Image (cartoon, rainbow, N blue to C red):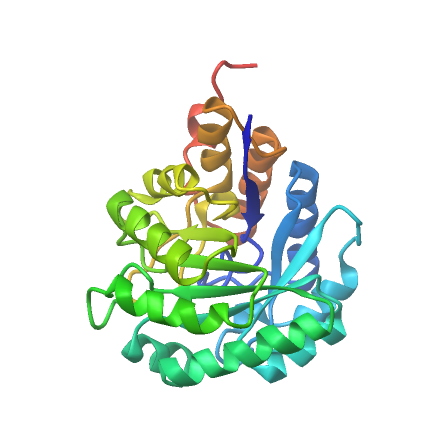
Amino acid sequence: MTSVHLVEVGPRDGLQNEKTALSVDQKIELIARSVAAGAKRIEAVSFVNPKRVPQMAGAEDVMAGIERRDDVSYIGLVLNRRGLDRAIEARVDEVNVVVVASEEFSRRNQNCSVAEAVSTARDVIRDAGSAGLATTVTIAAAFGCPFSGEVDPRFVGEILAQLADDRPSEIALADTIGVGVPAQVRVLADTARTRAPGIPQRWHFHNTRNTGYANALTALDTGAQALDASIGGFGGCPFAPAATGNIASEDLIYALDRSGVDTGVRQQVLVDAASWLGNALGKEVPALLGRAGAFPSG
């Protein structure tokens, strides 16, 4: 049986663009619900400046309050050395550092050029590895930029080649604004295999234009070892216009389960978690499985 890791990003990417900010206790409960569903990798917090992304405030308090388990790995998003220091102090298991594949978006999102972001990411990869942490480097906006349009996969390949020299544990290719289609997934998968050989691939999709699930299944066909998804399909990038939600964890797991792909994650627990989260945010759940129900029923 084929298998793939679900990386549950609801506690981070699912919350960062929502108008309602959850309390620390609510964030801890969302993480606990993710664990109860069977998620083994959870992007739990973001060590960014809370003045820029107030929804991510309280990262240290969240990490102090979660249940620690040997079979669950908690991930912290970091953008620089300061974020890494905070992540190490908070005892995350993994860090995810971001490089944006667009000059204009990089300056708007991280206030630096792509070259500067690559240099910072390389330092984070090396220093996090020395501290015993697994490292992911995410290439954001790899499928397209909301400000400058198309992103050349060759440019993504150049970024990957530089980062591969420091051997991160994993590379993640992100469709940050939900413009990608399966043909792009195949091109970028080939690019990553060529320019960052031997490094496992993780993929991050948004369903902004209703292509996220097709992209995820295509990535699985190309050898993806991990797929990001968010409980309920909440989320988006606060620095990109009209960047709506992530693909929903429960809808993705339904597709994977019905396709004979092992994830070890339970659909109904995710549906219940999405309902709880929708109530906490005061919003309708974007995901569809909670409305239609599983099949076969029961």
* 268 to 244, vertically: above or below: above
The residue shown at (34%, 44%) is 212
> Which quadrant, please, contains the N terminus?
top right
* Residue 200 point in image, percent of width and height: 52, 52
The residue shown at (30%, 73%) is 102
Closest to the observer, 110 or 289:
110
* Residue 186 point in image, percent of width and height: 31, 46
Closest to the observer, 188 or 30:
188
Q: Residue furthest left?
A: 149
Closest to the observer, 261 or 241:
261
**The image quarter in which residue 174 lies:** bottom left
* Residue 101 point in image, percent of width and height: 34, 70
* 265 to 211, vertically: above or below: above
Q: How many marks?
A: 0
**The image quarter in which residue 155 lies:** bottom left
* 8 to 108, vertically: above or below: above
The residue shown at (41%, 67%) is 160
Q: Is residue 238 visible?
A: no
The residue shown at (33%, 66%) is 156
* Residue 181 point in image, percent of width and height: 26, 47
> Which quadrant, please, contains the C terminus?
top right
Q: Is residue 20 visible?
A: yes
Left or right: 264, with 214 as reference point:
right
Left or right: 68, with 199 as reference point:
right
